[in-house]
Image (cartoon, rainbow, N blue to C red):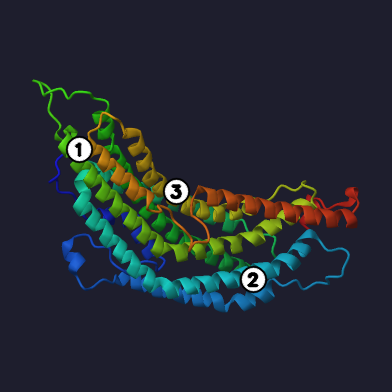
Amino acid sequence: MDTNMKVDSYIVFKSFSVPYYYSILFGWMPIRIPKNDREMINKNLWSISGLIFSLSYIILLIVSGSTTRELRNAIKYQGNRTSSNLTIHDRIQIVVGPMFIISLWLNQTIIIVIYILMPFHLKGLRKVFELFNAFFKSHGSIMGDKNTINMIARNTNIESIMMIIINTVLSIVSVTTSFSRIRLTFAWKLFIMIDNVIHKLEALSLCIQFWCMCSVLAKCFKCLNVSLDRLRVRKNQVMIRPPGLFTMSDRLILPTNMVMLLRKLNRAHTDLCFILDRINDVYQVLILLSIITCILNMLPHLFVLGIIMAYSNFRITPQISMVIWPLHYMLRVYILCKAASFATNEARRTKTILNASFDKRLTDDEKKGIKRFLERIDNKKIRFSLYGLSYLDDEYFLSSVMAVGGYLVIIIQSYMTVIEEQYPIYDRPTADKFDE
């Protein structure tokens, strides 16, 4: 491997290009990502298009918040609550209407807090870009040739594009199939639909940003782990065959250069772990707020789904929107958790490879190099956290799914108990009565 190989040190721009332009549309990225050394030293760090879209989205957010009070009166139940002939729709509007408004208020408040924190986020994100560029400039030869580096950027952008497409489809389907049973005017429904689609697409910007960062990290860790396969080659050879007519000697298999390789991989792994820590510092507040908004928005929809299933004695097939709305929010949590797991699992896999490569056939210097490598990994917490409240990984997502499932079961059981006391089994609402 040619240690003097020059690589594109600004590969982070290529890897981050899709999330970057997507984030500009929703005011998330009013800074430039440097494409070269000239833009790196340029004092003009702000993107005009990013500033314009950021200002436009803030105005849209203010306008959306000013109409919340009017929306509260529009969906407020106007009938007699003591009437005995209330339909399921009336009962849902009485209970879930205030929940919907409260979640909307809290969601808008959290978005305002996020935009207040945006300058600090962008400052930290700029530092992450610099760390990535410095890493590829220092350790690009360890990652592989130019084709490998470009493959990292290409695959990362493909992943981001797929997430954007899936989220866009889910957003449009869930929003356009909603509100059909809520008694609002067409103008109100159209406003709510547009506002919800925009907020859903805006919220995904954070997810694909974080996914992109973690995806590049995971691929770099993976390239580093592939380089550690040389230890297995060295371990499984008692004697090194001298180069023949059709064979070429590999300097990295020699004992002295193997120690050098271990040192380089150790430094590269250390730098990647430092980048992981900085990414966690930059995103953990926004991720925590994003998860809170997902929960706040999910609860009213789960409440509606639970009431309908309980009142209809499971004889009404839920609308597709009732299933897609909670699925959409859980998908955002899944993206965040899975992205973090990709990076941390690949980082911890280095320790497994080192332990498997440790063998008596290695020289004393090589064994010492592996021990130092392992000690440094053991002393480092390679995990994403949410300010110490929890670790962001697959286990966190599974616990979230279990909590959501338990919440839905409690709703159904509670309302079915009330229904059994009020209605005989032959007089329970059917799908026809639900549409009344």
Does residue 223 show up? no
Q: Give how far across and how far down residue 86 sits, in percent.
A: 83, 63
Q: Residues within 10 Å of mark 1 (few under 14, many from 20)?
A: many
Q: Give how far across and how far down residue 69 sits, in percent.
A: 63, 78
Label for residue 341? 3
Q: Distance between the Cα atoms at labels 2 and 3?
A: 34 Å
Q: Distance between the Cα atoms at labels 1 and 2?
A: 63 Å
Does residue 50 show up? yes
Asked if residue 302 is positioned above or below residue 238 in the image, the reply reads: below
Q: Is residue 48 left or right of residue 313?
A: left
Tag nearer the camera, 1 or 2? 1
Q: Earlier in the sequence, mark 1 or mark 2?
A: 2
Residue at (23, 25) in percent of width and height: 237
Residue at (36, 65) in percent of width and height: 24
Q: Nearer the viewer, residue 27 or 298?
A: 298
Label for residue 101? 2
Q: Are marks 3 and 1 in contact (CB under 8 Å)?
A: no
Residue at (23, 52) in percent of width and height: 136
Which quarter of the rendered picture does the N terminus lie within? top left
Tag nearer the camera, 3 or 1? 1
Q: Give how far across and how far down residue 297 sits, in percent.
A: 60, 62
What residue did someone put label 1 on?
Answer: 258
